[in-house]
Image (spheres, helix red, strand yellow):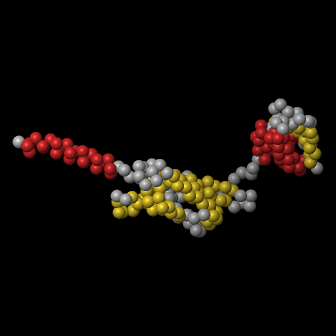
Amino acid sequence: MANTQSMPLISILVALFLVSSSLASTDVPFIVANKKATLNRLKSGAERVSVSIDIYNQGTSTAYDVSLVDDHWPQDIFDIISGNTSQSWERLDAGGILSHSFELEGKVKGLFYGSPAVITFRIPTKSALQEAYSTPILPLDVLAERPPEKKFEWVKAIGKIWICNFCHLYRGSFCVPGCHPFQVQCSKSKQEEALIITAEKLIYRKQTTGCMTVKEQIFVA
């Protein structure tokens, strides 16, 4: 009789044990990694690739012996300029983030498809090494031909500068809202130089005094 009455209690205890075991098994790190690569063309014509990788632990426990490897950059296509393509950390706590970056220089023209970075880590409840992958990157068009920079359009855009009749008469009127006109005169061969000098002066005046307080002229021979 006593044994019969104790059966429901035993069943409840077993159920609670199974539930607690199930909950304990979810107490693990959850690694998410975001990889980004951007191209930067230098004045010399060389092209740099800036790579950054952010590793997040969105789980509920610490990941240990965290290692990052991103070595899928062929040496015949890229040179390492700064940093390393691998990095290790002792731990990554729950809710934490680790960041790593390095810079490459492209040597070969063409479209490059990168691979995700590989992250490995350990958790106390498992002996096997755990593995995760970063997001992929968009294809990189290394050393691609780009149209020449339109300095005239660039100057017009900066600081909302308004330019009137510059190209035809070689004498232009530069206006910033609320300020006096800024007169420019130059020779035909010096148009771009005059535009750049004028833009620099306008930006400086806007930053320091708020606007042009007097009428001015620039002459570029």
Q: In this view, does 191 lie to the left or right of 148?
A: right
Residue at far left of view: 1
Vertically, is 86 above or below 160? below
Vertically, is 171 above or below 109? above
Residue at far top of view: 178
Residue at far front of view: 2
Residue 143, horizontal then vertical, whole percent: 66, 59
Q: Is residue 187 left or right of residue 144?
A: right
What quarter of the picture does the N terminus occupy? Answer: top left
Q: Is residue 136 left or right of residue 151?
A: left
Asked whether residue 75 appears in the rendered view, the answer is yes
Number of on-image labels: 0
Front-lying residue, 72 or 21: 21
Residue at horizontal 62 percent and vertical 66 percent from the top: 79
Residue at horizontal 41 percent and vertical 52 percent from the top: 61
Asked whether residue 72 appears in the rendered view, the answer is no
Residue 91, horizontal then vertical, whole percent: 47, 58
Vertically, is 4 above or below 107? above
Front-lying residue, 31 or 97: 97
Residue at horizontal 43 percent and vertical 54 percent from the top: 62
Residue 18, horizontal then vertical, whole percent: 25, 48
Residue 2, horizontal then vertical, whole percent: 8, 43
Vertically, is 216 above or below 29? above
Q: Within the image, what quadrant is residue 64 found in?
A: bottom left
Q: Within the image, what quadrant is residue 105 found in?
A: bottom right
Q: In this view, does 26 lie to the left or right of 200?
A: left
Residue at horizontal 57 percent and vertical 64 percent from the top: 84
